[in-house]
Amino acid sequence: MKFSITDSKNKTFNLPINPKEFAIDAATDDKTVSVVKLGQINLIGDEKLKSIEIASTLPVKTKDVHYLSTTEVYKNGQTYLDKLTKLYKAKKPVRLVISDTKVTFKGIISEFKYGMADGFAEEYTYTLKIGEYKAHKAKKVKAKKKSKKVAKKGKSRSKPPKKISRGSKVIVNGRLHGDSAGRGPGMTERNATREISLVAPKAKYPYHVATLSGGARGWVSKSAVKAV
């Protein structure tokens, strides 16, 4: 079994001594909420980013060390420390592959600790943690400007008709009647300029018209008048 690390430039090296164990941390982003008359329930969330952590040693000098896990080694442990430190500071994805397993883990080195332990000066100890990396790319979206709608030339809106009420000046084209019900039909007005003197909104002939000087003419239908 070999533990191989490949950098972002596709260059690979093997760790000289395999760790005693490794662990992959996987979890989901669950949330606990309280529901009336039911109590607490668990809402299953999406999967969080995984991480893998290994801890092992690096011989200060690899020559004549009999417990190496690979034959392809650098001359000393400092070279490994320099390479791992460089990868940690680069903040670029690396890939950890463990042979004879299905583990091929792509991520960013989030933690790297090293030193010496138990007063033994012949090897370095280190801990390496890699957090899962998922490729992503931000997309710049331009806000759409709201266009002001301008009416085309020659297509202006027609003015709303004037409201006809008592005192309005109108043009009358229609037969005059004695009352608003239509009794007593009389003369017919033709393009006569008149004034509304009385209004009976719900009647069949709702407008009573008079001359501009005040002389009564009679009641006419709604369609017979047009505002001036």
Image (tube, grey):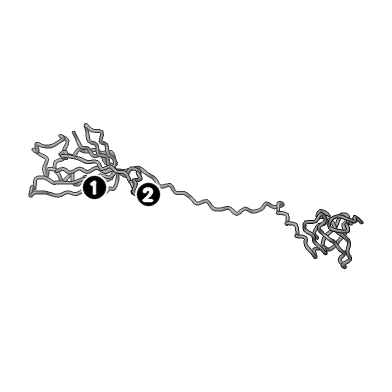
Q: Secondary structure at mark 1?
A: helix
Q: Position of residue 91 (x, y in %)?
A: 29, 48
The amino acid on which the numbered mark 2 sits, given as a three-letter code, is Lys
Image position of 193 with respect to 109: above or below = below
Q: Nearer the viewer, residue 72 or 214?
A: 214
Q: Position of residue 94 (x, y in %)?
A: 27, 42
Image position of 24 with respect to 182: above or below = above
Q: Residue under circle 2?
A: 37
In three-dimensional space, the C-alpha distance between marks 1 and 2, rounded to whole angstroms, equals 56 Å
Q: Which mark is residue 119?
A: none
Nearer to us: label 1 or label 2: 2
Please name the residue shown 17% across and 46% down the image: 126
- Residue 165 lies left or right of residue 135; in this view the side is right
Q: Position of residue 185 (x, y in %)?
A: 90, 55
Please name the residue shown 15% across and 36% down the image: 69
Numbered marks: total = 2
Query: For residue 162, what is the image quadrant?
Result: bottom right
Q: Nearer the viewer, residue 83 or 42?
A: 42
Residue 227 visible in rendering? yes
Q: Which quadrant holds the N terminus? A: top left
Query: For residue 156, what is the image quadrant?
Result: bottom right
- Mark 2 neighbour class, 10 Å CA radius: few under 14, some 14 to 19, many 20 or more: few
Q: Nearer the viewer, residue 85 or 101?
A: 101
- Residue projecting furthest to the front: 37
Q: Which mark is residue 86?
A: 1
Q: Secondary structure at mark 2?
A: loop
Q: Position of residue 79 (x, y in %)?
A: 17, 44
Among the two numbered marks 1 and 2 on one chain, the one whose residue lies closer to the N terminus: 2
Please name the residue shown 81% across and 58% down the image: 206
The amino acid on which the numbered mark 1 sits, given as a three-letter code, is Lys
